[in-house]
Amino acid sequence: MSENTLEQTIEHGNSSKKSSQNPFIGLRHFEEHEKHLYFGREEQVNEVLQKLMTYRFVSVIGVSGIGKSSFLYCGLEPAVLKTQTSFAKNWEVIKMRPSDQPKENFIKALESFIDSKGLEEERRSELLRYCKTEIFHGDDAGIKNVSHKLNDEFGANILLIIDQFEELFRILDHYEDERKSVQSEQFVDMLVRSLNDRETPLFVSIGIRSDFIGECARYPYLAKHINNSQFLIPQLTEDQLVKVIKGPLAMAQTNITDGLVSQIINDLKDQSDQLPIMQHALMRTWEYWKKNDVSGNPMDVHHYQAIGTMKEALSKHAQEAFMELNEEQRKVCERLFKSITEKKTDGRGIRKPATIDEIAQIAHTTPERVMEVVECFRMPGRTLLMPPSNVPLTNDTIVDISHESIMRIWDLLKTWVEEESESVKLYLRLSEAASMHQAGMASLWRPPDLDIATSWRKTEQPTLVWASRYDVAYERAMLFLEYSEKEFIKEQKRKEVLQKRRLFIARITASVLGFGIIVALLFLFYGEQKRREANRQKAIAEVQKQKADENSKLAQIESEKAQRSAEEAVVQSNRAQKSANEAKKSLKFALQQQVIAESKEKEAKQQKEYAEVAQQQAEIARSQAYNLRLLSIGKSMAIKSQQVDNPELQALLARQGFNFYDENGGNPQDPDLYNALYYGIKNNEEEDYNTLQYHSQNVRSIVSNTLNNKTYSAGSDGRIIEWSGDLNKHNVNIIFNDPSLIHKSISLDAENELLVAGGDYPYVLVIDLKNPDNNLKYISLDAEELWKLGFIDNGESIVAIGAQGSVFRFDLNSSEGKFELEDNVDGKINALAIHPSRNEFLLGMSDGTLKKFKNGTESKVGVKGNGAIISLAYHPNGEEIAIGFESGVVEIFDLKKRSHKNYLKGHTARINNLSFRHDGRQLASGSFDKTVRLWDLFRPDDQPIVLSDHYDWVWSIAYSADSEYLLAGCRDNIIRLWPVKVDHMAERLCGKITRKMSDVEWGQYVGKDIPLESTCK
């Protein structure tokens, strides 16, 4: 449209009666009767018309939101109707969308066309019957024959407009039934056959999204026609955009300021869906201006800003409609939009129209309820859903979104589309597992798959109608899930029986230890007897010695007498000699007795020493047996504490069990002891104990600040929250909030002065923590989204990981305002770990390799394959790395020795998060098996503590700044706090205990032979 034409239009508008109808159509495409409002494509229409007349076929190609449908209906169609051909002077136009049943939809389009001609009923029925026979029962010449028949009947050329041609490809590469796929192929064959015949009075124009053009290669003959005659719709120039804005306003006798025109054109540069978003924003601006500006001033920038500008207008408008619904209608609304939108495996969003009746069955409601919601979203001035408000709704009415752009801009719908995509993936995986199980090639499902599937069934309540859109074996899949659930419940009951049996064995073990104490006491008694016997033998030996001394003295006296007697008389010599001999014998005997006595004394001393050693060994054995008994009792009390219903008794048992562990050298990280203390505290607190509920969506990243005892969290709700001091006191400060953003990763610099965030947006957000409200910085980069980021170079630089294997780097001291591309890594990057002190970082790859970047140089670290690497975490000393694999295994790898150190096994699904405690003693691992495990790195072979009192998988984990708690961001939008220091837990539990155990309780849980003691001293 030239400037002269635009001025003529304005003059015509000024001479006409001022219109009260909105001149902008909103999201939907232009209809034929609105061609007077269609501006900006006049030159391009002539080029496309020439191609259509030359080849009898033209494909109009363009990105979503470029205006293909409007071009066909209000640009090309009016131009064709003014053209004559060799076949006829007049034209008849047939319009259709193929959807998932192109033959049926072609017949519906023919029926609508024939009905518009006002034929007699007999003639109408005969013509319609002929068309149906040719299309459904004829060969591939069906469309060709129908075209000749219509030409003979009405003497006119036939223009067939096929909009949304890409809908055909969704059927062929998706999960729908084979019948629909065959029908689509037959329809394309008929279309090509009619184009190949130059005598057929049929002219065909199709509109197709450019991101689907490669799919046309499925049909070589159709691709040939597309190559011969195609037109790629370009973006509008600035002059053309001015016409698009001012032309309709001129028709409505409405003025607009040049400032607003410039503002709108500038805002368009940031929009991928230019025309529908602009039309919608202008529609809303005109309505606001019409309602609020009664002084006759032109539309201006403040009117445009009032509706949220192009950035927020659509999302606000859709949210406004949603908030008008009651609670029941909102649930129907969610099901409705999930039913008519779809996310393909490559991430592209496409329409999936459905009938009112079909949506009602999927949403577990009546068609009337669905109609109420549809009316709310298609009322005049909204046009978010099709058909338009002037078309009556019936059970068979097909409902569709007015444009794909609403899928990309309305935040709530983006969430629904993502949830529906995940729901479909889960159902297809479940159906495939059921099929393989039926064939004997797969086993029944177990957790975590079983838990995820049963939760999905309860939440989504899938119906046969919904499931049949993706895989018709709905009953088989549900029976497989139900059978898996029943078998798992049986298995759990068997495990409970086994657990009771283990408890019985523990009691038997305690009895055996008691018996050991008795044996030790018997040894003590035997040693005492031996000691007494040794003392008695010693006494006997001393008596024998005394006798020997006395005999020795008597022998000496007798010898002296004999010598005197020998001098007195010779006659007495024989007698004296005899007496002397006897004396010598007595002396010899005495000496022998003295030796025996000394030997007895020595033996007695040895027996005493033996007895004393035996007594010491018996004392040690008795002490060890007693300690083992108390440890066994402590473990038993820890287990039993979790089985009682009385919270105070539970706390008493848990704390007394800790006392026995602590005083007798037990392992403080024992899982049973931890669970006893944890649930003892939890069951004596309020219901919201250990939960921080300030996020409205998934908590994707958590970091802690060790310098000022602060913790930061971020997630899919666009919030970044600062938690100060004692986390249980909920000292909260929301330092950033933008609901349109999804944060996936945050990080703190070395001085804890800056925080950076990245996610589903093409820049990095930098926040000055000293003044977070005012000092915000946006650093752009060439990536649609970021997965991981962090500080390197002692906080001087930022490294960021893009979704396509790109590694970016930004120097905070640089004058450049954009990230530099560091490297393009082959393969998918799943994890990033930055060294705590050196200028290097590690990347975990989906192929199981670990890549190291140091000073811009890439190298590989020799890690043995355990499948895809999902998560990484540096040990605080920087010499070791924890690696989480897809298989559920955690590996501790020594980077200095370049060798494996430990494997930590126990998880049954992928490890999506790892975090070391700040002192390096403990490692926390989060998994999609819905558990978090705490590993004692000083005792790696011991069983870990398993945290499982949450209801879904964990997105992020981190230790608090003081290492008192482990924080976990869960899929249910809650941050959970688990205390990790057992001695502090025991102290806290004492604050809940107001009494000591009674004599009866002590005898029942401890033992009557063990002295009663106060639990909290």
Image (cartoon, rainbow, N blue to C red):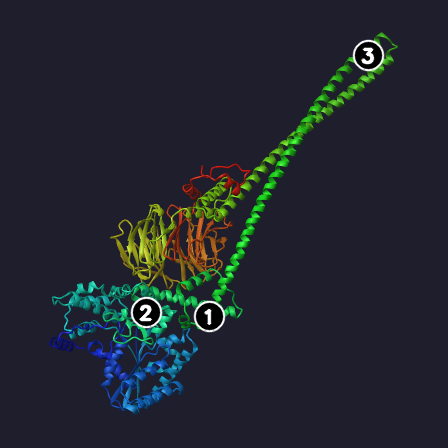
Q: Residue flagged by tag 1: what amino acid is it?
A: Glu
* Number of numbered tags placed on the structure image: 3
Q: CA distance from mark 3 to mark 1?
A: 129 Å
In this rendering, the answer to whether 734 lies above or below 241 is above
Q: What residue is rendered at 47% in x and 54% in y?
A: 891
Q: Residue 323: percent from the left, percent from the top?
A: 28, 63
What amino acid does circle 3 point to?
Ala
- Mark whose residue sits in front, 3 or 1: 1
The tag on residue 369 is 2
675 relative position to 29: left or right: right
Which residue corresponds to mark 3?
A: 562
Q: Which residue is mark 1?
A: 475
Whole-percent x, y for residue 436 in the image: 50, 69
Question: How far, Cα to Cα, is label 2 from label 3?
Answer: 145 Å
Q: Earlier in the sequence, mark 3 or mark 1?
A: 1
Is label 1 in a helix, a strand or a loop?
Answer: helix
Label number found at residue 304: none
Residue 144 appears in the figure:
no
